């Protein structure tokens, strides 16, 4: 019976397989080639998936992003890897491993994204046998894109010149001030006029303040205006100012007048910080070191003096030229200073050693100097404008670019974060293209060229809270970053007091789950409490001894002893020498 049942089941299975084969062959013949291709293609895909899962014949020509160079990854790592030898517990060890993995992934992503950062300036490259100094602005305008070509323009203002030009810290606004009294604030990218007015007198110098909503103009007196051109403050104490420079991190407006006074005004509160009589005659030039906020003032006798608001004497005096100093400029990093003299020489100085590096002669003399963010140096000599490449080697090379104006230049200023040089002259203003002048990468938390109104308001509040006091201005900008290496014993010797350091609490390692963090903290608190009780007992003993010997009691002796003896309370009477004293005791005979 069993054999017949097994044979019947085998026959049934064979019949089912034969029917399935006949139905499959019929489908292939009747369904056409299209159905056959789909079924075979699906089967092949499944086979490939199975092989990929098993790892058979695995070959991917696109394996993903390759790892950046190790040197670049090392540059973005934040400290060395933490050792895990003394780590106890699998949970803590896995947490540290995950943390290290996250740090390594962040460094790798940062190194990979540096390839997209435009951290290299784009200078003009000439062909063989050509010079970039022979290129005209129109040639550059035709070679750049439409947005950059729109930044090359001229403003014809022939009636109130010569003009002084200053860009705002984020490079979005342009401030023009004519000697005849014409003042205008312009959003130069969109060519929109923010405000325009006549100051009612001569305007010798202009300067932006901490934001685009405030600027200062120096005429007979110093006046402060808002973004709509309304005069909100007039400082009559600062009169006949010749040059203005704003210190952004200190909220100070520095000015020098014709009577040789250096004046510092705190624009955040409107108070005078310092008024220094320099006694050097009429100043001929002024520059600000953006690295340490030191003001350099040039005079007619060829001496450049460096000043700080906390000192009424010059920090450094340098004899730079035999004739008068025409202009002074300091690089953005604070390493180099360039001076121009009346004899027609331009000298490059190293401010770290206060020594000259190189000099060149300019025919016709030099009127103005200006450094860009990338270290390009612009020199204005009459109508000629020459730009030299970065002076990192300490030598002047051939001119990088040159331009001939329609009138004599009266001011120079590079636009921050843009390859633009603004030139003010007696006929108006000219915006020149200088490739490689601006810094392509900016810190949005420090200066943001694309900030909104709300971001500007938040930045202004933050900058006011982080304002650096004027007393901290010195020649060494890294003085605040240095650590105080004096030990506790040295400070105690200087103050005349001997301070004993608290003994370190060392706990014995306990096993079997009794050495948790909470138990360790509880044991430390018990030890501290025991030490405090010992100190209290010592103080009570010393106070009682002083009272028994009849010595002059110290403050708190009676209360300490009374509390120790238990006589302090409601209705308690003084015991022995612990009698309460009264203010009437001095009148008792």
Image: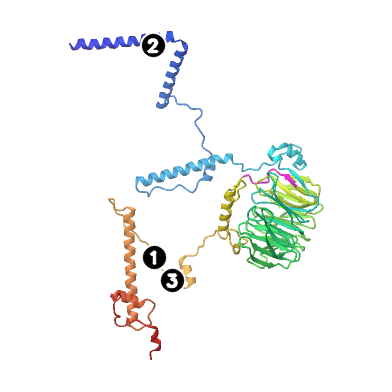
Per the model, the C-alpha gap separating discs 3 and 2 is 101 Å
Q: How many marks?
A: 3
Give the x, y percent position of residue 417: 65, 46
**256 on left or right of 426:** left
Label 2, on which residue?
A: 24
Q: Nearer the viewer, residue 7 or 558?
A: 558
Q: Earlier in the sequence, mark 3 or mark 2?
A: 2
Residue occupying image coordinates x 37% and y 64%: 503
Label 1, on which residue?
A: 502
Image quadrant occupied by the C terminus = bottom left
Circle 1 sits in a helix, a strand or a loop, which is it? Answer: loop
Residue furthest toward the left?
1
Q: Nearer the viewer, residue 425 or 534?
A: 425
- Residue 527 visible? The answer is yes
Give the x, y percent position of residue 75: 53, 45
Circle 2 sits in a helix, a strand or a loop, which is it? Answer: helix
Q: Main secondary structure of the magenta part?
A: loop
Circle 3 sits in a helix, a strand or a loop, which is it? Answer: loop
Give the x, y percent position of residue 299: 75, 62
Is residue 439 covered in magenta?
Answer: yes
Question: Which numbered tag is attached to residue 498?
Answer: 3
């Amino acid at each position: 019976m069993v054999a017949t049942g097994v044979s019947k089941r085998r026959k049934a299975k064979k019949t089912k397989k034969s029917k399935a084969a006949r139905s499959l062959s019929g489908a292939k013949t009747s369904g056409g080639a299209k159905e056959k291709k789909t079924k075979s293609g699906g089967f092949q895909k499944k086979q490939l998936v199975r092989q990929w899962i098993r790892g058979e014949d695995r070959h991917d020509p696109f394996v993903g992003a390759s790892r950046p160079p190790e040197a670049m990854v090392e540059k973005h790592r934040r400290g060395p890897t933490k050792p895990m030898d003394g780590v106890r517990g699998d949970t803590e060890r896995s947490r540290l491993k995950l943390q290290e993995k996250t740090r390594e992934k962040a460094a790798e992503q940062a190194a990979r994204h540096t390839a997209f950062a435009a951290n290299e300036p784009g200078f003009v490259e000439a062909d063989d046998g050509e010079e970039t100094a022979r290129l005209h602005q129109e040639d550059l305008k035709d070679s750049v894109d439409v947005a950059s070509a729109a930044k090359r323009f001229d403003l014809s203002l022939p009636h109130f010149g010569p003009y002084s030009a200053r860009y705002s810290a984020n490079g979005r606004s342009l401030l023009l001030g004519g000697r005849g009294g014409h003042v205008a604030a312009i959003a130069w990218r969109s060519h929109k006029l923010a405000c325009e007015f006549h100051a009612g007198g001569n305007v010798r110098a202009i300067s932006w303040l901490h934001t685009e909503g405030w600027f200062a103009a120096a005429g007979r007196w110093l006046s402060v205006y808002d973004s709509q051109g309304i005069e909100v403050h007039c400082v009559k104490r600062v009169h006949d100012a010749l040059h203005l420079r704003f210190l952004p991190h200190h909220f100070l407006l520095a000015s020098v007048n014709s009577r040789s006074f250096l004046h510092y005004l705190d624009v955040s509160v409107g108070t005078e910080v310092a008024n220094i009589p320099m006694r050097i005659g009429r100043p001929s030039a002024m520059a600000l070191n953006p690295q340490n906020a030191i003001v350099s003032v040039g005079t007619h006798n060829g001496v450049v003096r460096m000043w700080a608001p906390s000192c009424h004497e010059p920090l450094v005096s340098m004899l730079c030229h035999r004739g008068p100093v025409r202009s002074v400029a300091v690089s953005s990093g604070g390493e180099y200073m360039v001076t121009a003299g009346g004899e027609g020489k331009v000298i490059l100085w190293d401010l770290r050693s206060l020594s000259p590096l190189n000099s060149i002669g300019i025919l016709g003399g030099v009127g103005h100097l200006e450094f860009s963010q990338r270290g390009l140096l612009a020199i204005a000599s009459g109508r000629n404008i020459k730009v030299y490449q970065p002076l990192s080697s300490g030598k002047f090379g051939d001119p990088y670019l040159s331009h001939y104006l329609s009138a004599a230049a009266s001011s120079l200023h590079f636009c921050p974060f843009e390859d633009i040089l603004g030139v003010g002259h007696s006929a108006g203003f000219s915006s020149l293209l200088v490739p490689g002048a601006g810094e392509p990468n900016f810190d949005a938390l420090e200066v943001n060229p694309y900030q909104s109104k709300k971001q500007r308001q938040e930045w202004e509040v933050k900058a006011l809270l982080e304002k650096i006091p004027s007393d901290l201005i010195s020649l060494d900008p890294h003085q605040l970053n240095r650590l105080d290496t004096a030990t506790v014993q040295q400070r105690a010797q200087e103050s005349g007091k001997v301070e004993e350091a608290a003994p370190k609490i060392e706990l014995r390692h306990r096993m079997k789950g009794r050495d948790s963090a909470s138990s360790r903290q509880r044991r430390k608190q018990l030890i501290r409490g025991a030490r405090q009780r010992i100190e209290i007992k010592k103080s009570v003993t010393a106070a009682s001894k002083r009272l028994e010997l009849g010595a002059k009691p110290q403050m708190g002796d009676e209360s300490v002893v009374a509390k120790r003896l238990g006589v302090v309370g409601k209705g308690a009477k003084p015991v022995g020498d612990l009698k309460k004293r009264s203010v009437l005791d001095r009148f008792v005979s």
